[in-house]
Image (cartoon, helix red, strand yellow):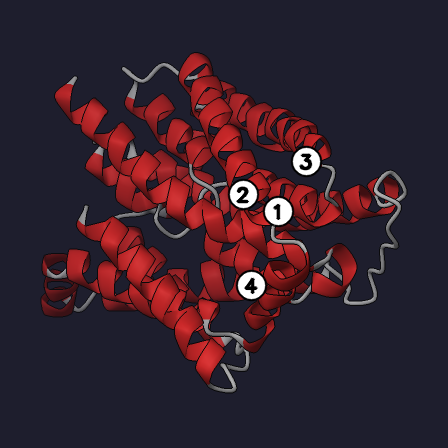
Amino acid sequence: MQLIVIVVLGAFLGYLYGANTDGFIFSSKICLFAGLTLIMPSLFNFELAHIKLVWEDKKILLKGFVVNYMLLPLLALAIGFATGDFGITAGLFMLAVLSGGGMVMHWIKKSKADTSLGFLLLFLNLLMISLSLFMMDVFGTYSAGYFEMDYDNSMGLGRFAKGVLMLLIVIPFLASRVIRHIKPLVGLIQKFQKYISHISIFLILFYLFGLQNVQVLEDVWDFDPQLIPISFVAVLVFYALTYLLAKFVYDLDSPQERAAFWHTVTRYLTLALVIATFTLNSFGVSMLLPIMFAYVVQIPLAVYINRGMEKS
């Protein structure tokens, strides 16, 4: 419940700040901040030797690839096309191709899943960002005509891939290699990790929802208000079906499969919101709606799932 309040409060206050000021200008430093505060602490116990899990758990990895990069995108397209809006469909599709996220390790640890495999999956999914962005480009190219819209990729989706890898994998990993040799600092970070992650989530959401680009949502509220409830229902359906699919595909009694399960039911919302704010001209303002509603749906869903796991 505490985490849900933090998420809602951070998003609401951020949007309120942006609406009453000039808003924030995006800086990639927010991604570095997320990498160091949400991802790096989970790397202290990760060893390069854990890469061997790629072979040992190849069936789980293959299962996760099929679910996250084939089934979920198809599911998002089906729901999106039913809404009849290009932007909402694009937002859902982006959620579908961005697996895991900064908080996925939090849920993996809370549910006593395999943290080594969990981080390896996080690492691999971030490496797959190039594929995710390519899929977004293909989606825009071949679906815009269906919605009678023009698709312009002059922003170049591929340019995000290199920055994501550096800020969310390379730098946090290198920082963890250095810091873990400073035992008192590691102990301090681990002791207050819950508070660090909560404060980090609040600040990230406050910043992202306070961005200048996010304020264009007023256009939706002024001219297409019906898209707001349509988008919310679409997100609810997407997460409900994603949860049912993941529960069917993965064996939750296995710590390894439980880690893969979390990489399916949680999507990389922060990264999705960052990319979306820079591709509004390509997909439309309504693209932001599913991603913003995803924050409201994903966190409570994760809390609910984790409580169910703890009881069982």
User: Residues under labels 3 and 2: Cα distance?
Assistant: 11 Å
Q: Report helix, strand or loop for mark 2.
A: helix
Residue 309 in which image quadrant: top left
Q: Report helix, strand or loop for mark 1.
A: loop
Q: What amino acid is at disc 4? A: Val
Q: Are marks 1 and 3 in contact (CB under 8 Å)?
A: no
**22 with respect to 176 (left or right):** right
Residue 293 visible at all: yes
Reading the image, the residue beneath label 1 is 226
- Residue 52: x %, y % from top left: 43, 33
Q: Earlier in the sequence, mark 1 or mark 3?
A: 3
Q: Which residue: 37% across, 64% down?
A: 12
Number of the label disc, if any, that sits on residue 83: 3
Q: Earlier in the sequence, mark 4 or mark 3?
A: 3
Neighbour tally class for label 3: few under 14, some 14-19, many 20 plus, Cα within 10 Å: some
- Residue 254: x %, y % from top left: 30, 18
User: Residues under labels 2 and 1: Cα distance?
Assistant: 6 Å
User: Residues under labels 2 and 4: Cα distance?
Assistant: 23 Å
User: Residues under labels 4 and 1: Cα distance?
Assistant: 24 Å
Residue 49 visible at all: no
Number of the label disc, if any, that sits on residue 110: none
Q: Earlier in the sequence, mark 2 or mark 4?
A: 2
Q: What amino acid is at disc 3? A: Thr
**206 with respect to 97 (left or right):** left
Quadrant holding the N terminus:
top left
Neighbour tally class for label 2: few under 14, some 14-19, many 20 plus, Cα within 10 Å: few
Q: Report helix, strand or loop for mark 3.
A: helix
Reading the image, the residue beneath label 4 is 274
Reading the image, the residue beneath label 2 is 229
The mark closer to the camera, 4 or 1, is: 1
Q: Does residue 142 sit above or below 279 in this rendering?
A: above
